[in-house]
Image (spheres, coloured by chain):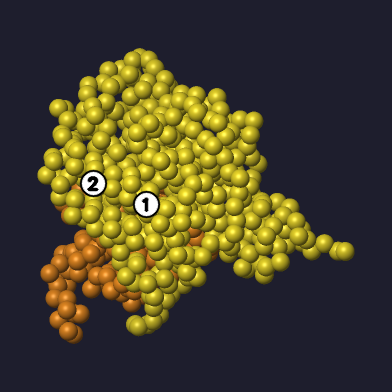
Chain colours: A yellow, B orange
Amino acid sequence: MTGRGTRTIRVDTLARVEGEGSLYIKLVGERVADVKLKIYEPPRFFEAFLRGRHFSEAPDITSRICGICPVAYQMSAVHAIERALGVPIDPAVRLLRRLFYCGEWIESHTLHVYMLHAPDFLGYQDSIAMARDHRAVVEKALRLKKIGNRIVQLLGGREIHPISAAVGGFYKTPTKQQLRDLVDDLEWALEASLEAVRWTAGLQFPTFEQDYEFAALRHADEYPFNEGRLVSNRGLDIDAAEYEDHFVELQVKHSNALHSVVRGRGSYLVGPLARFNLNFDKLPEVARKAAIDAGLRPPVKNIFRSIVVRAVELVFACAEALRAIHEYQPPAAPRVEVHNRIGVGQAITEAPRGILYHRYALDENGLIVTAKIVPPTSQNQKRIEDDLREYAAQLVDWPIEEATWKCEQEVRSYDPCISCATHFLRVVVEREDVQD
Amino acid sequence: MLIIGCGNRQRSDDGAGILVAERLRELGIEADMRIGEAVDLIEAWKGADDVIVIDTVVTGGPIGTVQVWDGRHQLASIRINASTHGLGVAEAIELAYVLDQLPVRLRVYGIEGRRFELGAEISPQVQRAVAEVVGRIIADLSAPHGRGRPNPLKAGW
């Protein structure tokens, strides 16, 4: 404890330890001998927890997997179950779900771009140190995030663990006026996002390009949220139902999270970079122009530039939210009636960090027989390790502290999830000198 | 007075703050529940003069220990080495301080936790600590200096 006026006490306190991540890199001489990224993966627990529950509980239960992206879990859950049960979705509900997702993207991308990633490029230890010198930037981030939160709160029914999304629609849908009340804020947010693109484009990026396999949803008419085929730049073009034929999860000794790979090929990358590269032509004009003006054209192969791509996706999310609000006509009923039946359904939606796969098998009473959940961070995990093998090799001559910090920045470019995968990351770089 | 319980009920002892908020609500006392993310917290207490935050902490002390910090003058420097997402209650306080968005009065109740596994029961010591914190907050609310107490900072004391 310290006296009045002194601003620090060290309590070594870790709140909300939702799983511990660690990164271990071993350098032998100038060679990267080993890279191990350990993350903790709660979805396995939830898969077991879901068994025997009624399908109507799945959106609520899975939304608790992640405090940052509960909407993503709800959306993948409702779509997978609706496919299992053959439920038709009202176009107005579909539009509202896109708006719901816009809110979550605005919240999540704002947090990462401004508070978690920007300090790396501006040379600050964290956003608090950054806020001392860039107060206006941080205040803007707070306001932007709040706008995303307003959307999620309105459609989700409450601020944490939204409860309104349901199999078949929503438990409650908003009025046109409730949505119109968001317009002024979103118009401001759109301008702020355009500024974010210009601001992030001016940062300095390490030279580090990799030959990634990008995987993202692709839809005929729109930048993807809830629908589309899963495609990649290596020729993949599949329905969600075929996901497990093409992607396999491998056990690795050093982590209790499974490593996802493309069968027969290896690691792949999901998230903003993959979406942008595979769907650039589907961005609204305002976002596409912002990207081009910022010098960003697909394919972007430098993961550090994902901060600019996230800002472009912020522009998209704000523009798309305004479009959805403009077009919205309340549905005849908030949700359609859904009946129990035996079935299996899979769905992929685009969480802020990338594709989120859910599969449910249901019995005749609507009870969940099996559930499978593959979150984006576990899909990127092997890709992060592959990146670090290359990236650490560039840093072998650097002082160990700086090399460690740079590697951590590389991991942070992926925005590894606070709850789905890891809360915090301990980095260990071990160096063994080789006798000549 | 704004009371905010933070944490995750799915994560054993990490649910302590939420549990306190739930108990207070059962007793008819308004209490907010948050995951404890910094930006969200700053937004939650915006405009509030008198705020109590309850969160699980790990200080290495005996499980179930209750500590109270004055958030305005004793910034709990909850630093996580090489954090990727270390933006919790302590960061909310520090950030709010930098941005002049700290409530006039801010107290943080920290309940020492030990178990954070998914789906595990909350530890009995933490349950007892939850009851203790609920009692202390109620006492604070009903004391003459509780709700409606003249604010010393605003009054220029």
Which amino acid, by three-letter code, is at mark 1?
Answer: Lys
The chain to which mark 2 is attached is A
Q: Nearer the viewer, residue A98 or B120?
A: A98
In the picture, residue A174 is in which quadrant? top left
- Where does the image place residue A140, in percent across and percent down from the top left? 30, 64
Q: Name the residue under label 2.
A: A322
The answer to whether marks 1 and 2 sit on the same chain is: yes
Residue at (78% x, 61% y) in the render:
A29
Q: Quadrant of the N terminus of chain B?
A: bottom left
Label total for image: 2
The chain to which mark 1 is attached is A
For the residues carrying marks 1 and 2, which lies nearer the camera in this image?
Answer: 1
Q: Mark 1 points at which residue?
A: A289
Q: Visible in this render: residue A377?
A: no
Residue at (49% x, 46% y) in the render:
A298
Q: Report, in whole angstroms, how far the alpha carbon at label 1 lies from the one at label 2.
A: 18 Å
Which amino acid, by three-letter code, is at mark 2?
Answer: Leu
Residue at (41% x, 53% y) in the render:
A291
- Where does the image place residue B92, in percent across and percent down from the top left? 35, 65
- Left or right, A296 with reference to A74: right
- Where does the image place residue A86, in percent across and percent down from the top left? 33, 19
Up/down of A276 relative to A17, above or below: above
Of label 1 and label 2, which has the lower sequence position? Answer: 1
In the picture, residue A177 is in which quadrant? top left
